[in-house]
Amino acid sequence: MASKNDKRGNKPNFLFIITDQHRADHLGCYGNSVVKTPNIDSIAARGTRWNKFYVANPICMPNRASIMTGRMCSVHGARHNGIPLSKDHTTFVELLRDAGYATGLIGKSHLQSFTGLPATNKFKQKKGLSSPSRELRDAYKNNRHSPDYDLEDSTRWHTPLADRVDGDFYGFQHVEIAAGHADQASGDYLLWARKQREDFDSLTGYENALPDESIDAPQAWRTAVPEELYSTNWIADRSVHWIDQRTNDETPFFLQISFPDPHHPFTPPGKYWDMYDPLDVALPKSFGKGDLPPIKAMREAMEKGTDPRDNQSPFTVTGDEARAIIALTYGMITMIDDAIGRILKQLEASGLADDTIVIFTTDHGDYMGDHSLMLKLLLHYQGIIRTPFIWYDPKRPTDGRAIDDLASSIDISATILGRAGIQPFNGLQGRDLFASDPVNAIIVEEDSQRPMTGFDKPQRVRTVVTDRYRMSIRQGENWGELYDLKSDPTEVNNLFEDASAVPIRATLTETMLRRMIELQDRAPLPAYRA
């Protein structure tokens, strides 16, 4: 009997699962013996996982835009949160749709801003100079400030996104969005939750949390939202429904399933809240170590009680706080894993499993106690730049193969297009991981919109990672970072100013320069020779 794949011209389906702020070592298949992730582990056991997979940028919007375009953030322009991905940029999902794929996105998108908060980095008029007209204040006339870039703004989300999109959404024909994080997720999910309970808003947030004295840690509360109304469960329900509708459809599909967790705040619902005992959690080996200027500043701020612990900026924690937060994060991850189990079961029940490639990754990691830090931003330790990437192809099973070649989130698009038999567009910078030679270095970019503890001005950081080393350089700072990942995997011995490491630093500088030249834009194509 012919499979559905044979009937659709040998085009595989793709199930692309992505979480938010999820370290590679917070999965069983990446060596964690505490957190329970049997369903994700089962994908890895049948497929391939990359041990040295790195982000193009360790922040949500820039790296998600890089995944969608296969291009570095310095090229696609979404340099930091708050800058949407331009609709002038081609996405790999548009190529799939153009090739006849049905495309869907369920869960978090974050290709546009969802907070509605005003930007901190704005055009400033200088004294004694006439100011340009508003449309001429930026190098880009299409500066992405128009209403069609406010589609994910939670403060304006009164109707489903699908009703407000003209055509598709960055290539996705079907969209159901859960914007935001934890028990404060919004978007289409929130519209649904309010229909289930008229008092739903009275269940969310710290102010409505259930009493619980077992955990005392920043941005952690026992949510009153029940498991069945939590965003992770809604995403699973909607994904199961979407897959079920494909049962008798011979059109190949690409479905992106995007969970907002385990990004902070830390609010695993129901049984997942105390599923893990903080006493069972080991602190990272680098906890309490490190003397970089911003880490010193954050530790001093914690001691004085002046550190901002209720927003997106990184901060330092005590050992008890770190254990508590990691335990809660494990609960959020296991809830995601349970949801993935339901989705994979539906894939089997629909007769689609044999024709569907399953991919798992995340947008970036979290310090999770590394060097006593929490969250992310600006310090490119392995915990935030190294992420999981798992690929299972039922037609080409590899039975748990682990690959140590360097790879980047910009490679995801080219790898999917390659397997679908679709030629990439001009300017796509990623590589098909199954059809290309390995690279000798990965570049990680990060620009910040505002200063934060330990930095007196917005930062611009560039990092190069090789098989053995990680080096980071900052614009306008007189210090840098250089670590030997072979002898110092927890990155506590900074060799940047070490005289014996001068030749290594010189080699890495040249490697970084050559790789950055390679990643310069090659789009658009010329119209004429001259």
Image (cartoon, grey):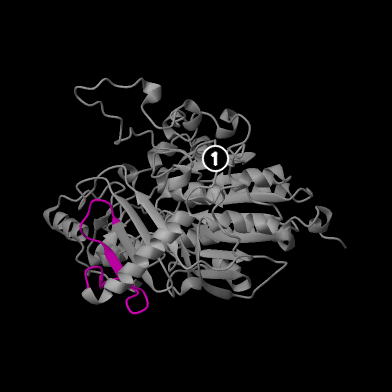
Describe residue 157's horizontal placement relative to residue 368 as left or right: right
Three-letter amino acid code of the residue under disc 1: His
Residue 332 sits in which quadrant? bottom left
For the C terminus, which image quadrant?
A: top right
Work out which quarter of the rendered image holds the N terminus and state it: bottom right
Q: Give the vertical position of 99 relative to 328 (above or below).
A: above
> Residue 499 placed where, x, y %?
22, 74
Quick check: is 493 in the magenta stretch?
Answer: yes
Please, what is the dominant secondary structure of the magenta stretch? loop
Left or right: where does residue 129 sit relative to residue 464?
left
**Position of residue 302 in the picture relative to residue 98 (left or right):** left
Q: Which residue corresponds to mark 1? A: 89
Residue sitting at x 51%, y 35%: 191
Which segment did they paint magenta? 474-498
Q: Is 394 part of what is drawn in magenta?
A: no
Judged left or right of residue 182, residue 411 is right
Residue at position x 32%, y 61% in the image: 472
Residue extending furthest left? 304
Q: Is residue 142 above or below residue 529?
A: above
Q: Nearer the viewer, residue 358 or 292?
A: 292
Numbered disc total: 1
Q: Is residue 491 above or below residue 337?
A: below
Q: Is residue 228 visible?
A: yes
Q: x%, y% of residue 60?
A: 43, 49
Q: Quadrant of residue 35?
A: bottom left
- Residue 296 in which image quadrant: bottom left
Q: Position of residue 238 (x, y in %)?
A: 60, 46
Residue most extreme to the right: 1
Which residue is more in the foreground, 108 or 388? 388
Report the residue at 47% width, 29% height from top: 142
